[in-house]
């Protein structure tokens, strides 16, 4: 297994944006959210979600209504834990398959609860994406989240100080996308990761 880069930060700090830049540079990015979207299409997982959260999480065509699921799953810590218990094992399995397939190539883990995941043991380099509280709140509003939704989701994760203290590198994301791209490129050079040819 090659270099495994773990990205952590607050909700709406720009972790996925950093992952996107790294993907543009040719690194393999393993996106847990994308894997979760695939996992919940699997009949056994969808059935388990319906059993736990009710028929109301289904759209008219029988597929998962992700917004309805989020409304129920993030209401309280127990519901969130139940959701994670159903979906996360399959997501981890899919990510591990891709990690093995990547061989010695550098890989980026874009996993919302990475610090709390068994996958954390595989990370060789941690990056913390930092953004101001006000900017993160503005980004959450741009996603049409209800007031307080960002804070509610963040309360279900390790606190920011724990994430920041785990990271060897900090990327500030309070400026433009161009600023962030320059910071990512400088960081890759600093940690000695040479992006493969695209």
Image (cartoon, helix red, strand yellow):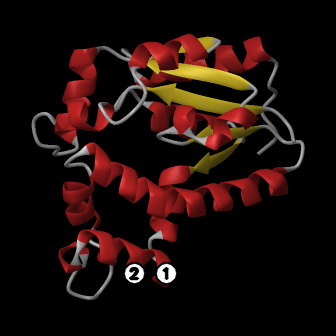
**Residue 27 placed where, x, y %?**
72, 40
Q: Quadrant of the C terminus?
A: top right
Question: Horizontally, is 13 left or right of 147 in the view?
Answer: right
Q: Residue at x 21, y 58 (%)?
A: 72
Is residue 32 visible in the rendered image? The answer is yes
Check residue 44 in the rendering and tell me which mark sits there, or answer none.
1
Q: Residue at x 76, y 27 (%)?
A: 124
C-beta proximity under 8 Å, tags 1 and 2: yes
**Residue 150 placed where, x, y %?**
23, 34
Q: Residue at x 87, y 42 (%)?
A: 1
Q: Please tell me how crowded label 1 is: few (under 14), some (14-19), or many (20+) other residues with Cα within 10 Å.
A: few
Q: Residue at x 41, y 18 (%)?
A: 160
Q: Please tell me how crowded label 2 is: few (under 14), some (14-19), or many (20+) other residues with Cα within 10 Å.
A: some
Question: Horizontally, is 175 left or right of 66 in the view?
Answer: right
Residue behind mark 2: 47
Instruction: Single out the residue that lies furthest toward the front.
Output: 78
Q: CA distance from mark 1 to mark 2?
A: 5 Å
Relative to 191, say whether 94 is above or below: below
């Amino acid at each position: 297994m090659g270099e495994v880069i773990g990205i952590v930060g607050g909700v709406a700090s720009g972790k996925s944006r950093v992952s996107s830049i790294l993907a543009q540079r040719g690194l393999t990015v393993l996106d847990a959210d994308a894997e979760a979207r695939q996992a919940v299409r699997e009949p056994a997982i969808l059935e388990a979600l319906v059993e736990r959260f009710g028929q109301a999480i289904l759209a008219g065509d029988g597929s998962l209504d992700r917004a309805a699921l989020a409304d129920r799953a993030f209401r309280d810590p127990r519901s969130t834990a139940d959701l994670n218990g159903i979906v996360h094992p399959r997501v981890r399995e899919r990510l591990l398959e891709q990690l093995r397939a990547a061989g010695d190539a550098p890989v980026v883990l874009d996993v919302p609860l990475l610090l709390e995941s068994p996958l954390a043991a595989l990370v060789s380099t941690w990056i913390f994406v930092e953004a101001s509280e006000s900017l993160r709140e503005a980004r959450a509003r741009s996603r049409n989240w209800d007031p307080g939704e960002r804070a509610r989701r963040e309360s279900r994760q390790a606190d920011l100080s724990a994430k920041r203290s785990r990271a060897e590198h900090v990327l500030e994301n309070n400026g433009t996308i161009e600023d962030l791209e320059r910071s990512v490129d400088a960081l890759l050079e600093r940690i000695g990761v040479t992006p493969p040819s695209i």
